[in-house]
Image (cartoon, grey):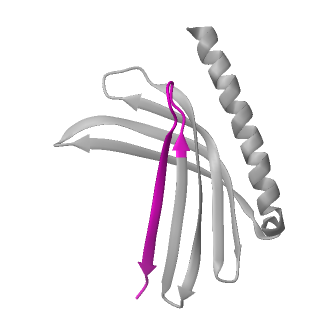
Amino acid sequence: MYLQKTLTLSTMIKQLVFGAAAGALALAPLSATAAPYLNIENNAGYSGGDYLGATTDFHVGFEGGEGVYSYYAQGGPAFVSPQGEDGEFELSGKVGGNVQVAESVGIYGELSFITAEEDPSVGTKLGVKYAF
């Protein structure tokens, strides 16, 4: 079991490194305005008043933009701790951006992932923000 997890984790890390390298090359023209950051975030879940567990992300990322466009990319370990079970570390990350379509209106999107023993979990976010 340990060997299987190690090989799987090794494969995931290689995929993450190659994916990050490809993303960095794609965003290289924008990186002149990119600023690095550290983001530690905890997301806890509740259902009907019952605590389900939490995931804490320890991400390193960068953000930047030019004109009406802004973007960010971050990733790193995530500690997943379901209620009543031992916690474990997974890999997680997200990329996103915003386009300011008018002075007070922006359209944003995000693509996120977290690894798991079986299949990775992927999430999306798309929205419109109106400031007044």
Q: Is residue 73 above or below residue 108?
A: above
Image position of 9 (left or right of 89): right
Residue 68 screen position, x and y as percent: 64, 82
| Magenta region, main secondary structure | strand
Q: Is residue 72 magenta?
A: no
How many numbered marks have been drawn onto this rendered protein structure? Answer: 0
Residue 4 screen position, x and y as percent: 61, 13
Which residue of the protein is positioned furthest toward the front in this rendering? 119
**Measuring 54% from the left and 34% from the top, which residue is drawn there?**
115
The quarter in which the N terminus is drawn is top right
**Measuring 54% from the left and 28% from the top, which residue is drawn there?**
89
The quarter in which the C terminus is drawn is bottom left
Residue 55 screen position, x and y as percent: 44, 38
Q: Is residue 129 above or below residue 62?
A: below
Q: Is residue 64 above or below residue 69?
A: above
**Measuring 51% from the left and 30% from the top, which residue is drawn there?**
116
Q: Is residue 119 magenta?
A: yes
Q: Which residues are magenta?
A: 113-132
**116 vs 54, nearest the viewer:** 116
**Measuring 64% from the left and 66% from the top, which residue is drawn there?**
71
Image position of 70 (left or right of 54): right
Which residue of the protein is positioned furthest toward the left in this rendering? 48
In the figure, residue 98 lies in which quadrant? bottom right
Image position of 52 (left or right of 126): left
**75 vs 128, nearest the viewer:** 128
**3 vs 46, nearest the viewer:** 3
